[in-house]
Amino acid sequence: MPFISKIQRQTDYTLFGSATPIVIDNGASYFRIGWAGETQPRVVFRNIVQRPRHKTTGETVTIVGDHDPALLKYFDCTRSGPRSAFDSNVVYQFEIMEYSIDLVISSRSYRMIISWDYLTDSAIVWCLAPSNAKILDFGFDRLGATGSEIDHPVLITECVSNPVQSRSKMGELLFETYGVPSIAFGVDAAFSYKYNQQQGVCDKDGLAMCPGFNTTHVIPFVDGEPIYKGCCRTNIGGFHVTDYLKQLLSLKYPHHMTRFTWEKVEDLKMEHCYIAPDYASEARLFQKGAREAEEKTRCWQLPWVPPPTEEPPSEEEIARKAAIKERQGQRLREMAEAKRSSKINELENELHGLEFLLKQLEQVQDSNVPSFLAETGYVSRQEIESARTKVTQSLRKAKGEPKNEQAETDKASPNANEKYSLINIPDDMLTPDQLIEKKKQLSLKSMSEGRQRLKQKRYEEELERQRKQLLEEETRLENPELYLEKLRARYKDLSVKVDQRKRLKTNGGHSNGNNLAGAIGRGERLNAVQRERMRLLTTAAFDRGKGEDTFGAKDEDWQLYKLMSKDIDDGDEGPDEDDAELARISSRLQDLDPTFVPNKSEAGSSQPAAEAQRARPLTKEDFQIVFGVERFRCPEILFNPNWIAVDQAGLHEMAGVSIRRLSCKDEGLEERLTSSILVTGGSSLFPGITERLEAGIRMIRPCGAPIKVVRALDPVMDAWRGAAAFASAPQFHTQTFSRMDYFEKGEDWLRNYQIKYSS
């Protein structure tokens, strides 16, 4: 099973003697391994394991630590997420199968897990090693170990009050799998405190506050030794801060959720987040939009490529396009001219033919006229003349000559008698064909007269409308305020009238008990036409029930259906006029009165629907992630865990809890503890955490009590440095236990095993 990582393998493993201890800081976030006595670990990587499959071959590989993003091209990392061996800072992922007994075979070249399944009562061979074995395999391999066993003592860190089962499993793993000669367990926060004590940062009596990755611990120290009965733990750490920031950014910028990877959000947290001295006042600054808030706001610019800008065309390009357009226009004009000439020729030929036909008709005797017309396809001379008139008008239109309506009217007036020559002739003097022609002439004459009357009526209505507008404008100019008041009153009356008519038309919005909208209910909800229809139906039914049914025997009976089939608005001749008048007054008020607001129903019916907003092009600001309140809101959960539904004490309250648990009789001990408070761990890197802790502890301590909060020299690496310094001491070998001690004394002995940090 291959390992994949960028960490370089060390080459000086054989230069260290077997008595030189190997120091391992097995943190929930990072795994650090190196040699005792050195100031920096040799190998550092994320304490996670991922097992993706190759996209082509399907082979499963193990990725320890941070993986290269280029691996996504070859491996499917979506189905196998990162896995950690920790749960709340405790190593628990030693077995991966439930209801099974796992037996690890000790072999560096060939390792597997043999599991016994109680459900099937059979042995199953799994090719998966425990998560910690993968981490340790990779760590020892990068350190340079080449043999089948590790012949160096190992000092490995653990959390405060680590369960004996976890400690026992870790010891069994190191002894059985790697052949380690001796092991020592120590608390990471205690090593960090002792290292800073040696550097003069803190005293022998004090508190070590360690906000770590998954949990936060507070350990009191008395005479340089940790007092574990006074320890305190809260399940809040840097992991929860990062997760909270990731949630806030995903909610604030849902379109960029794929950008908020865990690694990127972790970097943003360490780069931008800080602890507010007073959260409430800091939040009010951002709420008011003060200048201080703008100065504290940070921006992360995502990759953005501006859209290409179109350069204006050059003069040569403009001239070339204009020439092409001119040629196309010239070609279209030539085609239109050719088509127009062809049409003029056709109309002239048709006009010459009709005139020739009329000249021939004058030379034909009256008795031979019907036979002559039958050959031409025309019925009468008037029809030929009407066709000639139409062709003449079309020819003038095609030639572009102006229309002389007066001449046409004068010309048509004397010919009106000729056009309708059969109207005044009695029917007994006409032939059957002439009777048909007479009916046609009567219809044409009535239609022509109707059009003239309609045209005259529209002309008179337009004159009347213009006259009313002039009068209305004169009235407005005489007294504008009185005019507006009357206009508003008129608008109000018409609105009430139109709304009442609409309610009556829709039956008042009521139902007939069957939830059928618009059904007919009580009589007072009906309009006049509906009431008349109901009366006719009632009368017809009453008359029909008197005796013999004779309905339909008379023609007058069928008039009932005509009356009943009238349109609903036949009796209301004014609705269209009212709506038009209401729309006119509304438009007039909108022009004259800027404070006028039309009714919702009238505005919805008269105003056109708003067009859908067009999508604007994306700009640089659309790819900016702004950090404002999030900068101090996310780390605030270290002091208020209940914000993320963790009902536990905050970081400043844990100091008081730890001091109270000591229940010491020495009154000066509490003051000595609060006079030397060391903050260590990865989450102590937030700016402002020491000031906030000092202010919070001062609130729970008596007035005037000495309080001093300091940060470790290197909160991340001091635990490993302290462990390396402790392992390099001559008396370190007296603090370890061997494989023989482990198997002789058993697991219960490990329950009380503690090293002496001051020895």
Image: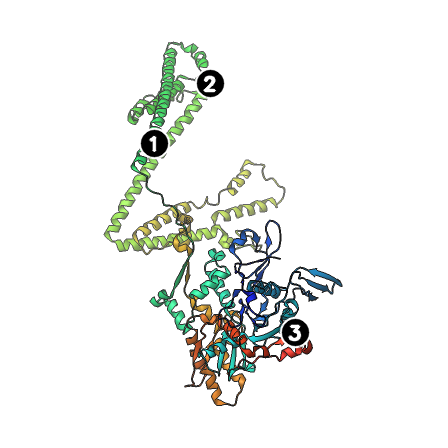
Q: Amino acid at mark 1?
A: Lys
**For residue 454, what is the image quadrant?**
top left
- Residue 481 placement (x, y as % from top left): 27, 55
Circle count: 3
State the image coordinates of residue 364 (x, y, percent, origin top left).
40, 9
Q: Which mark is residue 739?
A: 3
Q: Inspect the image, locate mark 2, and give the three-letter code of the amino acid beneath it.
A: Asp
At x 29%, y 37%, the residue is: 315
Does residue 118 appear to the left or right of 348 in the view shown?
right
Tell me which numbered mark, 2 or 3, is placed earlier along the sequence: 2
Q: Is residue 149 above or below residue 321?
A: below
Nearest to viewer (mark 1 / mark 3):
3
Q: Quadrant of the C terminus?
A: bottom right
Query: In 3D space, how far apart are the residues under numbered discs 1 and 3 (Cα atoms)?
Result: 96 Å
Disc number placed over residue 289 in the picture, else none: none
Tell me which label, 1 or 3, sits earlier in the chain: 1
The residue beneath circle 1 is 325
Which is closer to the viewer, label 2 or label 1?
A: 1
Structural crowding at the residue carrying mark 1, measured as other residues with C-alpha within 10 Å and reported as few (<14), some (14–19) or many (≥20): few
User: What residue sits right under mark 2 in the picture?
Assistant: 433
Is residue 524 in view? Answer: no
Instruction: Decide: few, some or many residues near mark 3? Use Cα within 10 Å; few <14, some 14-19, many ≥20.
Output: some
Q: Earlier in the sequence, mark 2 or mark 1?
A: 1
Q: Which residue is depicted at the point 44% across and 21% down?
A: 437
Residue 438 versus residue 282 in the image, above or below: above
Rendered image quadrant of residue 329: top left
